[in-house]
Image (spheres, rainbow, N blue to C red):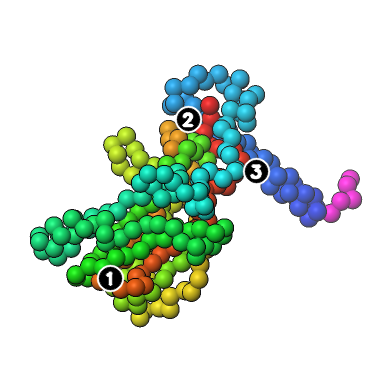
Amino acid sequence: MSNEHPDKKVEGTRHHHDDYEQRIYYLENEIKRIIDLLKECCDKGKHCDNEKYYEKEKSACHACRTTELVKNGGFEVPGDGENTFKFWTIEIIEVENGNQQQQQQAAKRQEELASIGATDDSYEGVVAAQFTTEGSAERTEKKARIFQEVPVTSGCLYRLSFAENFLPLLGDFDFGELTARVYYTGPDSTQYDLIKIFIRHDPGFEPIPTGYTYHQKVADAPVPCTVSTVTVEFLFNISDIGGQDPDNEWHIDGVSLRSEYATAICCS
């Protein structure tokens, strides 16, 4: 007859049962994970050899580049022709304001209402990008964007970071908005956001930060397995009259897009 206390024996049995349940739970989740990965490969039309895939599961996943993906994110390299900065595209956006005559005037002068150029008020290095509003007869929204197409690896999760400095030098503005986005374009030309950072300033509602503010955000989801290019975009929108010296400005610098992890969720 055993001298072991009954309670101790029962306790040991319970621990053994708990350990068994944990092992079963782990195996069930591992099987589900492998099945999901195999299904993804099959859905992409890839040859599915289960035994071969088990052996090469890790090597079959795409590797994510952890180096910098944005080119000229510090705006130090000047462009040629119409582009102020190399690798970046600038576009002044027409905004509908007021009556038809005012809209026609705005359309005619849209290139004069706003501009994106270089400034020595930098966050890092010696140059930054500068959005500036110009004079208008009426209070007008002035919009422009600067963007870059960036090759990425399918299935990788990315982080966007940058610094911005809003300078309401005129002091008379209705609002200022900056939207930073990382998005991909679907087959139907629809844009799908992976990362979106929205910044708005309203006069009198809150103190406007002085100097640069650093922002960063990780994507809500990895890049889909059918996508190989994303767009990094900064959209400026300031409503004012302007036309005085100095005008209202918004500076950005230190733009970066990097992968959070070294391995993607997509398989070859």
Which element is circle 2 on? helix
**Compared to 94, does 262 lie above or below?**
above
Residue placed farthest to the left in the image?
100
**Magenta residues?**
1-5
Residue that badge 3 annotates: 21
Q: Is residue 255 above or below residue 201?
A: above
The numbered dot on residue 135 is none
The answer to whether any part of residue 217 appears in the image is yes
Residue 59: say if magenta: no
- Of mark 2 and mark 1, the one earlier in the sequence is 2
Residue 155 visible (yes or no): no
**Cα–Cα gap, marks 2 and 1:** 56 Å
Q: Amino acid at mark 3?
A: Glu
Q: Is residue 168 left or right of residue 136?
A: right
Q: In which quadrant of the rendered image does the N terminus lie?
A: top right
Mark 1 or mark 3: name the one nearer the start of the chain: 3
Look at label 2 and name its amino acid. Glu
User: Is residue 4 on the magenta stretch?
Assistant: yes
Main SS of residues in magenta: loop
Foreground: disc 1 or disc 3: 1
Instruction: Identify the residue under disc 2.
Output: 40
The residue identified by callout 1 is 243
Image point (19%, 60%), residue name? 106
Q: Look at the numbered discs 2 and 1 and tell me whether their residues touch, using CB distance below 8 Å.
A: no
